[in-house]
Image (spheres, rainbow, N blue to C red):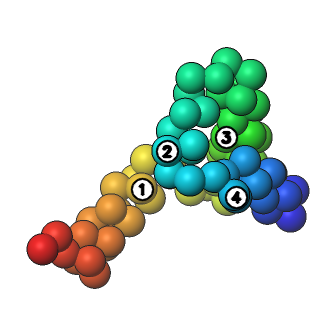
Amino acid sequence: MAMVVEAAELVEIFQWLTPEQSQAIQDDPQKHQHLGEEIADVLIYLVQIADHCAVDIEAAVEKKLVLNALKHPAL
């Protein structure tokens, strides 16, 4: 549940921004730092869940990318 709260905090950063405003975050050191902190919070929880459940993250991502490519082929 804590990861979902952190993910919500991450999404909140972008909630009302245009695509151009979202990209401009990288030009604002304070906003960019905040974004990095929220990404780190989500990633920490994901890594902890994977570790607790013995999921090989790299293998899971590779497998999922293959499945996604089969399900949604490039046109």
Amino acid carrying mark 3 in the image: Ile
- Between marks 1 and 4, how big is the CA–CA gap? 26 Å
Q: Earlier in the sequence, mark 3 or mark 4?
A: 4
Amino acid carrying mark 2 in the image: Glu
- Between marks 1 and 3, how big is the CA–CA gap? 17 Å
Q: Nearer the viewer, mark 1 or mark 3?
A: 3
**Residue bearing mark 3:** 39
Identify the image quadrant of residue 37.
top right
**Residue bearing mark 2:** 20
Q: Are marks 1 and 3 in contact (CB under 8 Å)?
A: no
**Residue bearing mark 4:** 15
- Between marks 2 and 3, how big is the CA–CA gap? 20 Å
Q: Secondary structure at mark 3?
A: helix
- Between marks 4 and 2, how big is the CA–CA gap? 13 Å
Residue 59 in the image: above or below residue 21 = below
Amino acid carrying mark 1 in the image: Val
Identify the image quadrant of residue 30.
top right
- Between marks 1 and 2, how big is the CA–CA gap? 29 Å
Q: Earlier in the sequence, mark 1 or mark 4?
A: 4
**Residue bearing mark 1:** 61
Q: Secondary structure at mark 4?
A: loop
Q: Earlier in the sequence, mark 1 or mark 3?
A: 3
